[in-house]
Amino acid sequence: MKISKVFVCFLLVWAPALAGTIEIKCPEFCACDIFQGLKRATCQSRKLVSIELNIPAQAEILDISHNQISKLGDKIFLADAEINQSTFEAGRNRIMEMSRTCDENPATAVDQKALEKYLESNGPDPANAGVHALCITKNLSWQNEDGSVNKSLITEKVKAIFGGVDAKIERYIEDCTEAKAKPEDTAEQLLNCYRKHSPKTE
């Protein structure tokens, strides 16, 4: 069934995870702007025949009206994946457990109030934040003892939550598991990526 004359607008349920000051990287055949506080990609009237294209990952509204698209591909957005809620919650609880464990050691402990302010972007990076993050990621086996990233394990964890890894999720994994100058920086990146891209719960 053709949908070339039908206005199609997707409001992504994961928008809060990507909210903030991130710029929209817009494909050349789309126009991107902010509409009523939401990041919008307008790709209408471009004779598109497929939606399997490089839609901005930060887009919250997508307009593909007046094209020649007859079918929407599977799992275009992360929101299309079926979330294994119990697996996700178990993983989140495990992270919280490891954070408490790392707080029991003065060498890896962090001021939780300072950390909360930092995560809300209302404060500086708290002392010991990197060491604390590395303690967590090593206990989770996200990083090995030498600080290298256990990418294969992380990929399996993501598959268990989303039921698979499509091209968009694969790009996130590649970006998030990229090694930084120091293992502590890599650990902070891994945890920041988890907070940014993980499913949002009520």
Image (cartoon, rainbow, N blue to C red):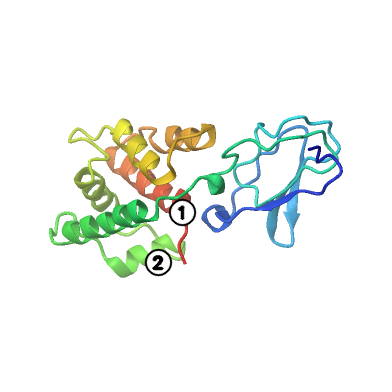
Q: Please give the label number shown on residue 187.
A: none
Against 179, residue 36 (above or below) is below
Residue at the outermost front position: 1
Please tell me whether mark 1 sits on a helix, a strand or a loop.
loop
Q: CA distance from mark 2 to mark 1?
A: 22 Å
Q: Residue at x 16, y 58 (%)?
A: 101
The answer to whether residue 19 is visible is no
Against 120, residue 174 (above or below) is above
Q: Please give the label number shown on residue 117.
A: 2
Q: Residue at x 69, y 61 (%)?
A: 37
Please tell me whether mark 2 sits on a helix, a strand or a loop.
helix
- Name the amino acid, label 1: Pro
Residue at the outermost left position: 105
Q: Nearer the viewer, mark 2 or mark 1?
A: 1
For label 1, the residue is: 199
Quadrant (top left, top right, bottom left, bottom right) of the N terminus: top right
Position of 17 with respect to 2 (left or right) is left
